Image (cartoon, rainbow, N blue to C red):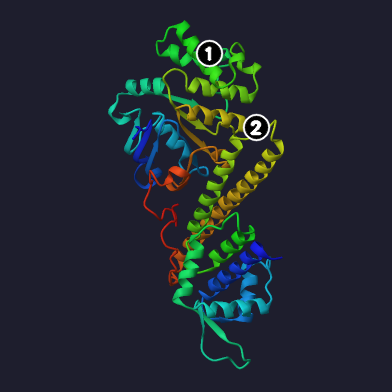
Amino acid sequence: MTEAVLRLSGVTREHGQGDVVVQALRGVDLAVLPGELVAVMGPSGSGKSTLLHLAGGLDRPTSGSVVVEGRDLATLTAAQVAAVRRRSVGYVFQDLNLLPSLTAVENVALPLELDGVRGGMARRAAREALDEVGVGALAGRFPDEMSGGQQQRVAIARALVGPRRLLLADEPTGALDSTTGEEVLRVLRARCEAGAAGVLVTHEARHAAWADRVVFLRDGVVVDQSGPAAAAESLLPAGGVG
Amino acid sequence: MHTAYAYSVSMSIRHGLLALLERGPSHGYQLRAEFDAATGATWPLNVGQVYSTLDRLERDGLVVQDGEPDADGRIAYRITDVGQAELRGWFASPVSAKSAPRDELAIKLALAVTTPGVDVLRVVQTQRTATMTGLQELTRLKTRVHDDVELAWSLVLDSLVFRAEAEIRWLDHCEARVARAAAERRSAAAERPAPAAPPLTTGKAGRR
């Protein structure tokens, strides 16, 4: 069986102490394989953002494990986690993804350069990544010279430039109209079909439907999931909410 | 009015009456009034429909007559074990988008919140997962459509997509309302404990 790019096992995250402990996530299991786009759907406060922060190494679980590309983040030093974030994980947020003073190609090359890749090589990889999301012609433009949809494509290119293949997207189409948002999701889906592993957090059913699998999160618990892979990787014993 | 729509309506009346009888024995006039009260009279029944449905339910062993006719000659009916199993199965399974008008879902939820012991949130989740699976299938179809050459088909798909999305949003809304109502009941019960209704379990979660 293919190894998961991201694997959460029994992940619990508590905030606060003593009487005021809030459990943002409770015993969540989730595996995302290369080539797979998984949507996490839930209302605000259901734990979606916590899940994404844990998956990207921006936060640590109270218990359970988060494994990215075979490396258990809990066993790594802070510097090693930062390296995993740079080399393996890309984020796409709702907006403000790109540095305004850099061109599209400079934005995409930046994570590679920060990781020590030489300028010329980083640029070549960045141009390739921009071609793959259909905005190669805009390489020299600054973010404010591009539409919202084009900027999100550049953000997807940056998230998956070089060796990175875990893409974490937090409401990436939230600021776009429905047609443009759909184009961005089409690109996201295509990049996953080409081998990336994607986690898409959204509260919009229409957006979640672009995923292979939709995981429903309620009060920090995965209550159900839809899609063809649901039977293969069962997430929880029956009877979630209620 | 015939074929699939009529079939589905009559199926829902059957399950609707079973749900009402789950609260206790009742006769036709009473059932009609309770059905209207539970569903806000969006789907008014006439008494003839109620009695013909009760006849079929009795024939199928899902209800039995409960004692002798009263002074006005009205016969009360009571749900059987087989009827309870049928009702559990109905609540546990999602409404199919292909065979039923959407009203069946609204009726089902209206009855779920008024039938003792039904896990309404599970009913909502079962339906949401089924509707989401349908929405994913529609979206997969969309990825194969080229807007420029198949615009008409693409727009039809969009209409189905938006309808499914609306249903999921409505289910989210129902879930929030039910959860809030349950929280209010719990805080009221904490002040004055009341005896619990006997449970009608909907069984474990259906996973397809």
Foreground residue among B197 and A225 = A225
Closer to the eye: label 1 or 2: 2
Q: Is residue A230 above or below residue A186?
A: below
What is the spatial separation of the Cα atoms under label 1 and label 2, in whole angstroms? Answer: 27 Å
Which amino acid type corresponds to the residue marked 1 in the rendered image?
Arg
Give left or right: position of B154 versus B15. right
Foreground residue among A80 and B98 = B98
State the image coordinates of residue B176 (x, y, percent, origin top left): 54, 53
Which amino acid type corresponds to the residue marked 2 in the rendered image?
His
State the image coordinates of residue A196 (x, y, percent, origin top left): 45, 27
Q: Give the structural element (helix, strand or loop) at label 1.
A: helix
Residue picked out by circle 2: B146
Q: Residue at x 59, y 39 (%)?
A: B141
| Mark 1 residue crowding within 10 angstroms, few (<14) / some (14–19) / many (20+) | many
Q: Is residue A4 visible?
A: yes
Check the residue under mark 1 and report the chain it is in.
Answer: A
Q: Residue at x 54, y 82 (%)?
A: B77
Residue picked out by circle 1: A127
Q: Is residue A16 visible?
A: no
State the image coordinates of residue A71 (x, y, percent, origin top left): 31, 28
Dots 1 and 2 on the same chain: no
- Name which quarter of the figure residue B150 lies in: top right
| Mark 2 residue crowding within 10 angstroms, few (<14) / some (14–19) / many (20+) | few
State the image coordinates of residue A195 (x, y, percent, origin top left): 45, 27
Q: Residue at x 64, y 81 (%)?
A: B29
Q: Give the structural element (helix, strand or loop) at label 2.
A: loop
Check the residue under mark 2 and report the chain it is in.
Answer: B
Q: Quadrant of the N terminus of chain B?
A: bottom right
